[in-house]
Image (cartoon, rainbow, N blue to C red):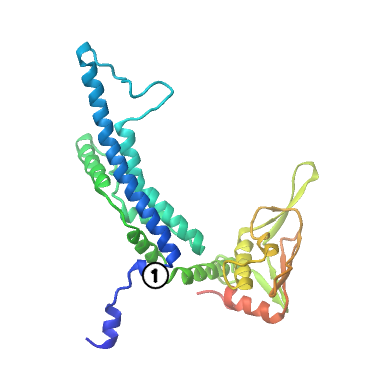
Amino acid sequence: MDLLSKFSSIEIKPDARISETDRTFCQAHQAAYDAARASLQELEFFWEDMQRQQQEALASTGNVPSESYLTTYGKLRLSERDIQEQRRSLHPAFIDRLASYFSSAYHLTIQTEDIKDNLLPHKPYHSSPQEYRPQMEEYTAALDSLSLHYTEILEQIFLQTGGRELAESAVCELKEKCRRAAWDSAGSKARFTLKKASLQLDFACCYRLHYQNYGAWEIFQRAVDILKGIAYFEAEGFSGIPDSLAQALHSGDHSKNCFTFPGCVKVQSMKLYKNHRIDIKFHTEEHARKFVEEYLGTVPPC
């Protein structure tokens, strides 16, 4: 085997591709998930034993009631079924929490349902009673025996990033959103104009008059996507974005149409117009041109 083949045969484990902070988070949730599965299984065993003791104690009466002293109206309500459902719900909850963490930490869009579809047993579709009952028994048995490990979830996340590192994939996703927002749906016509140090976005906002003559400005989502790209371009990362710029990064109502960005060294100000145009002014033409080239593209996307 030549040297290149040896390198290509080396498999990098998902656990080695995340930071120590990420690993600490994953291991803590792994421990909590494992402990919950074990505890609920023990609880189910004890609950069955407690119910049996109630039935034995009341057996001499000749009429064992459906309700025992273990549960009373308006107080503790528990059943073997409740415990089983809670235990089986731990698997999707574990996936949700890890996916949510990495999505938030790395500003990534993670398709959580795809991960569940790949890692969890599939609930059978309703068919004839003869077929459905054994299928459900097989499904619940698979859920009861399932034990997920966080590295399996990480593998699915890396599959969604195309094998790229998480931070790298986040930047690629951000730039792709900016390009999609900057060109029409056919990808042939730019919806922006660069004039010296000013970037003009077409059909990017509107002014709405609400009740009692109260008006508000709305920044459309496509413009917000571009503003998020500008924020990353300004801070050279997802953190450290100046508050003045961060306040403009939402599509909800704004009370003003003029924004200045003190503390920013690349982007200077933004103004919204009633003809749906937004002008974003950079400190220099070089900054404006570099942002367009790296984030929006100067030619139609492929």
* Residue drawn at 64 percent across, 63 percent down: 223
Of residues 75 and 140, the one nearer the viewer is 75
- Residue 197's spot in the image, x, y percent? 72, 77
| Three-letter code, disc 1 | Arg
From the viewer's side, name the closer residue of 179 and 12: 12
Task: Please tell me which residue lies in front, 75 or 253.
Answer: 75
Q: In the current view of this chain or complex, which residue is farthest to the right?
A: 213
Q: Quadrant of residue 56?
A: top left
| Residue 173 in view (yes/no) | yes
Residue 110: x and y in percent read 44, 59
Res 113 seen here: no
Residue lying furthest bottom in this view? Answer: 2
Q: Is residue 217 above or below residue 84?
A: below
Q: Is residue 213 above or below residue 72?
A: below
Residue in front for this viewpoint, 108 or 176: 108
Hey, which quadrant is residue 81 in on the image? top left
What residue is at 45 percent from the left and 68 percent from the top?
A: 166
Secondary structure under badge 1? helix
Q: What residue appears at the point 72 percent right and 64 percent down from the top-left corner?
A: 277
Q: Name the side, left or right, on which 88 lies relative to 203.
A: left
Q: Position of residue 204 (x, y in %)?
A: 67, 62
Q: Is residue 11 left or right of residue 188?
A: left
The quadrant the N terminus occupies is bottom left
Left or right of residue 299: residue 255: right
Residue 152, percent from left and from top: 32, 60
Q: Is residue 218 above or below residue 214?
A: below
Residue pointed to by mark 1: 17
Classify mark 1: residues with Cα within 10 Å, few (<14), some (14-19) or many (20+).
some
Q: How many marks?
A: 1
